[in-house]
Image (cartoon, helix red, strand yellow):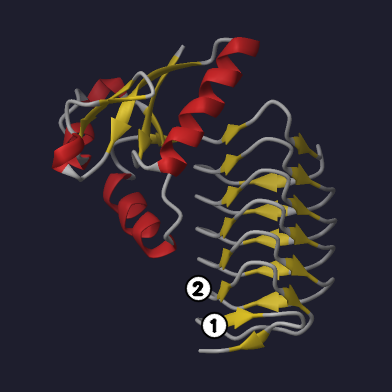
Amino acid sequence: MKELYIIGAGGFGREVADTVHTINERSPEYRLAGFIDDDASLWGRSLNDVPVRGGREYLKNLPPASAPCAVIAIADAKIKERIADDLDAFVIWVNIVHPTAIISRYSEMGSGNFLQADALVSVNTRIGNHCMVNTRSGLGHDAELKDYASVMSYCDITGTALVGKGVYLATSVSIIPGVKIGEYAYICAGSVVFKDVKANAVMIGNPAKQIR
């Protein structure tokens, strides 16, 4: 079994841990070695029976030959990016995919991604690195999710849509076919996006309008 650390001990991290338990119930794949979190007040505690081992320095101080697996369970794109850059040399980034997720054989996926229960990834889609697709969210044919993007539950990214680097889609967002979302944009819950979105924009409503 592969030794796995989850970086981030918040609610998202506990969701990832629960998914790992579900994966192992089907076919043992990972030994869940613990959470890694820079909040020192959590060190030594156990969250849902998973110990919090320490901060990032804990991983850096492991024996070089150990090469543990890891996934970042943090939704904030810029924090994820800093952590990934900091730990690239010390861990192997793995994809954690819930057994009920449906992934087309004709899709492409990088590393360090988390796909939650009932996620749907259709044909000829592309998912970058360190992305998250939460419960019952889907990517239609030929859609693309760039690095560090976070997709919350019940989102619908329709065919040929492009979700840029670091974008955050809150719960129940819908993106109309062919729309491009600029990097680090934030789309508020329940919004329906009919037109291209500029980088760093904050959008809300149906149809979605820029508020910042």
Callout 1 amino acid: Ala
Q: Position of residue 129 (x, y in %)?
A: 53, 51
Q: Quadrant of residue 67?
A: top left
Residue sitting nearer the eye, 111 or 9: 9
Q: Residue at x 55, y 68 (%)?
A: 167
Residue that label 2 marks: 184
Residue 97, disc? none
* Residue 93 drawn above or below residue 28: below
Compared across the picture, whether 66 is left or right of 170 comes to left
Examine the rendering and report whether any part of residue 131 can be seen.
Answer: yes
* Residue 119 drawn above or below residue 35: below
Compared across the picture, whether 64 is left or right of 136 comes to left
Compared across the picture, whether 59 is left or right of 123 comes to left
Callout 2 amino acid: Tyr
Residue sitting nearer the eye, 104 or 135: 135
Q: Residue at x 83, y 56 (%)?
A: 140
Q: Position of residue 179 (x, y in %)?
A: 76, 76
* Residue 102 drawn above or below residue 140: above
User: At numbered mark 2, what does the secondary structure look like: helix, strand or loop?
Assistant: loop
User: At numbered mark 1, what does the secondary structure look like: helix, strand or loop?
Assistant: loop
Q: Residue at x 50, y 58 (%)?
A: 148
Q: Earlier in the sequence, mark 1 or mark 2?
A: 2
Is the Cβ of the residue at disc 1 closer than 8 Å to that at disc 2?
A: yes
**How many marks do you count on the picture?**
2
Compared across the picture, whether 82 is left or right of 25 comes to left
Residue that label 1 marks: 199
Q: Position of residue 68 (x, y in %)?
A: 35, 26
Examine the rendering and report whether any part of residue 72 can be seen.
Answer: no
CA–CA distance in space, label 1 to label 2: 6 Å
